[in-house]
Amino acid sequence: MRDQMRPLQPGEYAPAFALPSANQEGTVSLASLHGHPFLIAFFRGLHCPFCRRQVGQLGSLQPALRAAGVETVAVINTPVERARVYFDHRPTPAVLLCDQDCSTHRAFGVPYGEFLPEGSSEKPVWPYRASMEQFEAARINPTGELPDALHPMAANALLNAQDGFELTEVDHATFASHPTQLVGHFLIDGDGIIRWVQIEARDGPDSLCTFPNAAEMLAAASSLRR
């Protein structure tokens, strides 16, 4: 089994990071954010239509989160040049950072999975060691946009077509490098301490692509004032 850290938990310190920004000059680091609470979300690459939607939601929430004293940061598993092209046409007020190697996802312990070999007698442990049967049986419709609950890969293909989003060679390479990366949201206070965590699909593959909604994120931000 590949060695995977558990997701960092409330009360633990956020790890140091420095990542290039797709919509600001230079890099953004934990040190540059120190003293300001922020919500940081770690996503798959642009090939994931659900991640693109969540980035949009974070952008729409940015004024309310900022009013609560919380900055909004999205980390996307895609090269910065590719992200700049996409977000030049779809700007967002959220701070957009790029991590094409998922190194920061790893530092925060955001899970990624692998599949057990066919015929393995090992007990599946979602998401770290899943059975292919477990994944193939998954059916999702987290945003209600699909005609029916579909397999995650079919859902991605349908929404990408619906969006008119065509994957580039860079997008295909990103997916090939990190096909089982999950998504995680972390609220970090001004001292760099994690105060709230949400990890995608903790209960199994039927909750893939289900992310925290606006009310959940605003409630978490408001809790910092208590």
Image (cartoon, rainbow, N blue to C red):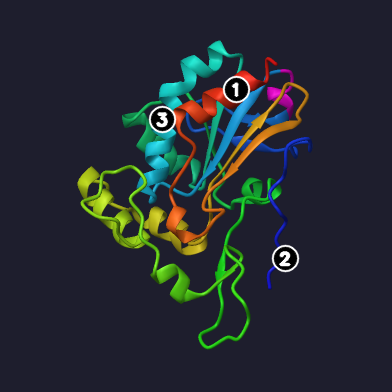
Question: Would you say 34 lies left or right of 163 here?
Answer: right
Q: Is residue 45 above or below residue 24?
A: below
Asked whether residue 95 is in view, the answer is no
Q: Quadrant of the C terminus?
A: top right
Which label was assigned to residue 27?
none
Q: Amino acid at mark 3?
A: Gln
Check disc 1 and report the residue beneath it. Answer: 221
Separation of residues labelled 3 and 2 (CA atoms):
33 Å
Q: Position of residue 15 (x, y in %)?
A: 75, 40
Residue 33: within the magenta? yes
Question: Would you say 89 lies left or right of 105 here?
Answer: left
Q: Quadrant of the N terminus?
A: bottom right
Q: Report crowding for label 3: few under 14, some 14 to 19, many 20 or more residues within 10 A (C-alpha).
A: some
Image-quadrant location for residue 116: bottom right
Check disc 3 and report the residue beneath it. Answer: 57
Cβ atoms at labels 3 and 2 below 8 Å apart: no
Check disc 2 and report the residue beneath it. Answer: 3
Q: First in sequence: mark 3 or mark 1? A: 3
Asked whether residue 168 is in view, the answer is yes
Q: Report crowding for label 1: few under 14, some 14 to 19, many 20 or more residues within 10 A (C-alpha).
A: many
Separation of residues labelled 3 and 1 (CA atoms):
15 Å
Magenta stretch: helix, strand or loop mostly? helix
Front-most of 11 and 32?
11
Picture residue at 49% right of the left edge, 40% below the top: 80
Cβ atoms at labels 3 and 1 below 8 Å apart: no
Stretch of the chain drawn in magenta: 31-35
Question: Would you say 183 lies left or right of 16 here?
Answer: left
